Amino acid sequence: MTIRCWGQFLGFLAADITRHPERLQAVDAVLVQRLQALVGVVDVDLDAALSEEDE
């Protein structure tokens, strides 16, 4: 996703939150546990260069 796309998405998200704040939901411990079970332990090197496919 390009930087422009991210900007458009974040703009959309901000506008939706402004129009419908009642839709916001907290992330509870049960959801966090489900996500951790699905993803497991993933090591990420934030300093590693992206491959051409990931750019």
Image (spheres, rainbow, N blue to C red):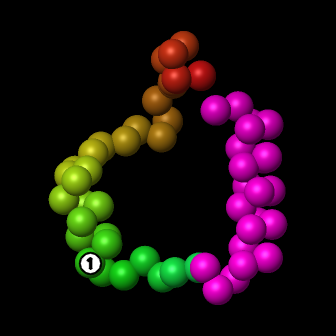
Amino acid carrying mark 1 in the image: Val
Identity of the residue furthest to the top in this view: 52
Residue at 31% over, 72% down: 31
**Could you say whether the residue bearing mark 1 is in a helix, strand or loop?**
helix
- Find residue 7 and report its horizontal and vertical position in percent: 78, 47
The residue drawn where x is 36% and y is 81% is: 28
| Residue 3 lies in the magenta-colored region | yes
* Mark 1 surroundings: few (<14), some (14-19) or many (≥20) residues within 10 A: few
Picture quadrant of residue 23: bottom right
Task: Decide: is 36 above or below 26.
Answer: above
Seen at 46% across and 29% down, the residue is 48
The region drawn magenta spans 1-23
**Quadrant containing the C terminus in the rendered view:** top right
Q: Is residue 34 left or right of residue 28?
A: left
Q: Quadrant of residue 30?
A: bottom left
State the predominant SS element of the stretch in magenta.
Answer: helix
User: For residue 13, what is the image quadrant?
Assistant: bottom right
Q: Is residue 35 above or below residue 47?
A: below
Identify residue for label 1.
Answer: 30
On the image, the x and y values in percent for residue 20 come to: 72, 79
31 drawn magenta:
no
The residue at 71%/44% (across/down) is 6
Farthest residue to the bottom: give it: 22
Q: Where the N terminus falls, by quadrant?
A: top right
Judge by depth and name the residue closer to the eye, 48 or 19.
Answer: 19
